[in-house]
Image: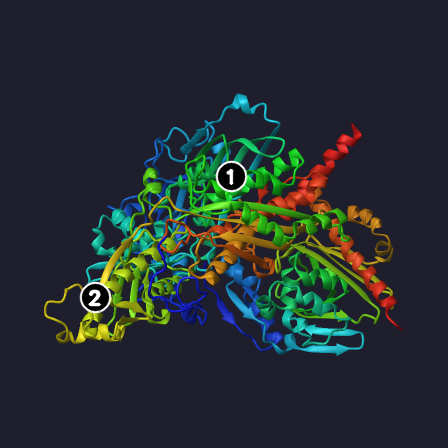
Amino acid sequence: MQESSHGAREGRGVGASVRRKEDARLLAGRGRFVGDMRFPGQLEAAFLRAPLAHARIRAIHIPEHLKGRAFTHADMVGVKDILAKTGLPGFRVSAQPSLASGKVRFAGEPVVMVLAETRAQAEDLCEEIRVDYEELPANHDMLRAAQPGAALVHDEWPDNVFLVSQTDKFFDAEKLASAPVKVTREVRTSRQCMSPLEGKGCIAVFERYLEQLTLWTATQMPHIVRSGLAECLGLDTRKIRVVAPDVGGGFGWKGLLQPEEVCCAWAALKLDRPIKWLEDRREHLIAAANCREHHYVMTAYADTDGTLLGFEAVAHVDAGAYSVYPFSACLEGAQVVSNLPGPYNLPAYRCRTYSVCSNKPPIVPYRGVARTGVCTAMELMIDAVAREAGLDPYDVRMRNLVRPDQMPFTSITGKDFDMGDYPESLRRVREMIGHDAVRARQQAGEKDGRKIGLGYATYCEQGAHGTSVYHGWGIPMVPGIESCGARLTPDGTLEVRIGAQSHGQSMETTMAQVACEVLGIDPELVNVVHGDTALTPYSTGTWGSRSAVMSGGAVASACERLGERIKRIGAHLLQAPEEAVAIRDAQVVGPHGSVSFAEVAKTWYLAPQNLPADIHPDGLDLVAGYKPTVDTGTFSYASHAAVIAVEPETGEVEILDYVIVEDGGVLLNPMVVDGQIYGGTAQGIGTALYEEMTYDEHGQPLASTLADYLLPGAGEMPTVRIDHIQTPSPNTRFGQKGIGEGGAIAPPAALGNAINDALKGMGVELSMSPMTPRRVRQAVTQAQVMQAGEAVS
Amino acid sequence: MKAARFDYQRPATVAAAVAALGGDHGAKPVAGGQSLGPMLNLRLARPSCLVDVAKIPELRRVEERADGVLYGAAITHAEFEDGAVPDPTPGFLARVAHGIAYRAVRNRGTVGGSLVHADPAADWPTTLTALGARVVLAGPQGTRELALEDFLLGAFSTALEEGEIVTGVFVPRCSAGARFGYRKSCRKVGEFAEAMCAVLADDGRGVHRLVIGATEGRHIVVTEAKAVLADPSRLDARLAAAGFDAEPATLRLHRKVIREAIAQIAIDALNSESLPA
């Protein structure tokens, strides 16, 4: 972290809740999304998708009149499969063809691309195509798919496991066997769909005048899509431009190269016509946007006072049929191993995770990535330990959280926690939720027969992972130095250009605030350009809670460098030595006067005759880079507390109160951070109580509309109260930490613990998310049957 | 998903609508389209022609009679909710309408469409059956009237004959002290119910009815429900007689919802007793 810079314009820079600049167009419905775009001569694509989860393709019958409009894998000569390898030893490579080749491996996999003037017509034409399949046994359950003898998803593999990840740190089974408290649990989290408001979509256009293929696409990572596309199409990267216009949320679903993008790009080149595809909600639900499915068997070993002595886990992650580009099928599984210990000081730990290949859509990292699963798993265990030991779950957490005096702390899996006071977040959240009053209310009981429960969850979230973290995984993309272009325009206003992409993160505002912090320029006079490979320097994009740290740092670096150049020109205009001038409020201020950026820019661009002939030729347009001093990532953290009421007869759960105390370091814009937390929490509530993508034993998806796949709505959102701790990260430009995903991590744990707390008197403990009314009723019914049985015997 | 190709007609009268439907067996009437629309887009419904009845004056009329109100089938949920149409009950219809799906659905969805769709988990079939409503049908053979419980044959199944449409629904007038209990359990606001029960106790008219919806099949209608309302445990025999069965966790939900609907009647009664005369 550096000392705050010189140029700050009071109340508009870092730390100010500046209103979102992008809202002027977005809230008025004036945004421009892929769906709003239309090019002359455009054709729309519909994809005929696999109706079976696992089958050999015997033949594809395309009527004669569809030749040139319907394309199969065989037509896409020279197009390479999507390959997302990792460098992890033992990783098995899955090649993902953009259109199915030989076999279909999940229901919804694209088999034929059909083009027509409109989407409706293209869908009509799809109905004229017949595909003969030979059905194969489908792997719908990861635990069975991982067993020997399961039908092979990829015929050339010996089994259905992408990778086994493991660690064993100081785990002495013999010694731990005598631990006073031992708790073993099985926890499962359901498969989910990411469900951004805007689905995927793209338009591929070959621009002849540029001799360049432009792909307009709803993506979080235009530069990565460009690289992946160039690889698949066998084109030089310079021949491709990728543009993300307005993008309506991503959450990870837009952080990949999609087969449909490859198909549209190929067809645009083949036919020399713009090709558009818009994912509809049914495609979104069944054909790819899957995430989150984990299974854990865990044992915690603890002392009578709740101190954790050791922890072991065997986990399975259902990674689906293919390894997605660029994050691979193993990011999730590898992160389970390294993140399961969470914010706790564990003395002994071992974990083995199987990334299982199944006949389901590939899983994609979703907001929070593996951390939502591991937080759920670990936090349910902490409460189980507390119940077993007869302690309050709060006290067990306090006993095991990493303390501030231990910071900076290296966790048992080698995570370098930057500064923070984890116990303080829990203390504060306890205070805010009114712990004692809730316990008293529980004692008193409810008139309506409902049961009150209190649940806590604490996590820490690694964000802005850098080179040193990612190179070990050897995936197609390793983040390095983040760049920003800064340009003072001839009228003295500013453009900053970043390769990340803002699709809800408010970066058009926050990055302008960073520029304001450095140069004192009004954020309203700053254009933040993003999401276009032709206009912005390279970036791996927006993912992993990295943009505030990485792009924020890069914007600051570029503005500082630009400031030096502005000062050089300004000093000349002020007839003062360079070292005697400073930048304040978008002016160069000298000992005897000041000159505005506008004057500096006008002189440089339009009246260079007023500058000395030998002035340094570097102008007011540059690219600068940034990397945090320690690049293993920032660790934001939070404690969540929830009070719920469960109706044991109906299983209905009402959230009565929800409190979050989080530490994102120095907040660039506290209002924006609160917005991120609210949105993430809504998604976390979805994970906890509603969202579930189920499959039957044939691998058929059972939720193909939003009537079957329930998302939380405004009516399900409690009033979330947020408090902030701001412990600066010592490693980042302003002390900021990545915070974008955090809200989505803890709610399933906090709510799950609250439900179990409410029902513990009935002998009920749930361990599968979402905790739906049906699961609650089933658990209550089962517990009563068991108790009745005990009473009889 | 986009709908498959279909033709579209908007006849001006019921007679013309019936004729249009009679002339094309693949034709289907549409009003608000809140259930049919998604089915079209998923290509689950593939009518050759949509006959739009939403604007036919006869389906938009409201006729107040001494013994009740006849509503045109194309009156929207929102019109009930907003009190834009007269209500022969002490506010029951507005209360039910307010809980149907979301406002966007209520703005377009119609009472007739809901009854014809006959989703057992929808609000109107259960509640209007409890209120003793009757449907008015028009078809090639003329018009006829049916009690709602005789019209609803099962899940998504009605007594509607080929070429017939529902033109209206008649809701009997309740006496002033009538009490109404309605409870449904939904996963979230606006979703279809997983269990529901509507109860009418109209001592003035001697009408006591209890209807259970959101079952796998036909609604369970108890028409002489006075004894059951006084002692809900008597319901078990009735439920068994109706062949009402499900796995224990589901039965648990239905039982609770039924008990709560009945309890609302009791609370209503207490409240009205405590009111000054």
Circles 1 and 2 on the same chain: yes
Which x, y percent locates residue A166? 43, 31
| Towards the viewer: A793 or A308 | A308
Residue A249 shown left or right of residue A540 in the figure:
right
Q: Is residue A68 above or below residue B132?
A: above
- Numbered label tally: 2
- State the scheme by which the image is colored: rainbow
For disc 2, the chain is A
The amino acid type, in three-letter code, at marker 1 is: Tyr
| Towards the viewer: A569 or B8 | A569
For disc 1, the chain is A
Which x, y percent locates residue B249? 69, 43
Q: Place residue B204 in its image quadrant.
A: bottom right
Q: Nearer the viewer, mark 1 or mark 2?
A: 2
Query: Can you identify the residue that label 2 sits on?
Result: A578
Residue A5 shown left or right of residue B110 in the figure:
left
The amino acid type, in three-letter code, at marker 2 is: Glu
Residue A785 shown left or right of residue A694 in the figure:
right
Residue A291 shown left or right of residue A183 in the figure:
left
Q: Earlier in the sequence, mark 1 or mark 2?
A: 1
Q: Is residue A705 above or below residue A160?
A: below
Q: Which mark is residue A435?
A: none
Q: CA distance from mark 1 to mark 2?
A: 52 Å
Residue A281 in sight here? yes
| Towards the viewer: A52 or A467 | A467
Which x, y percent locates residue B268? 81, 64
Q: Which mark is residue A344?
A: 1
- Say if mark 1 contacts mark 2, CB within 8 Å: no
> In the structure shown, which secondary structural element does the residue marked by tag 2 occupy?
helix
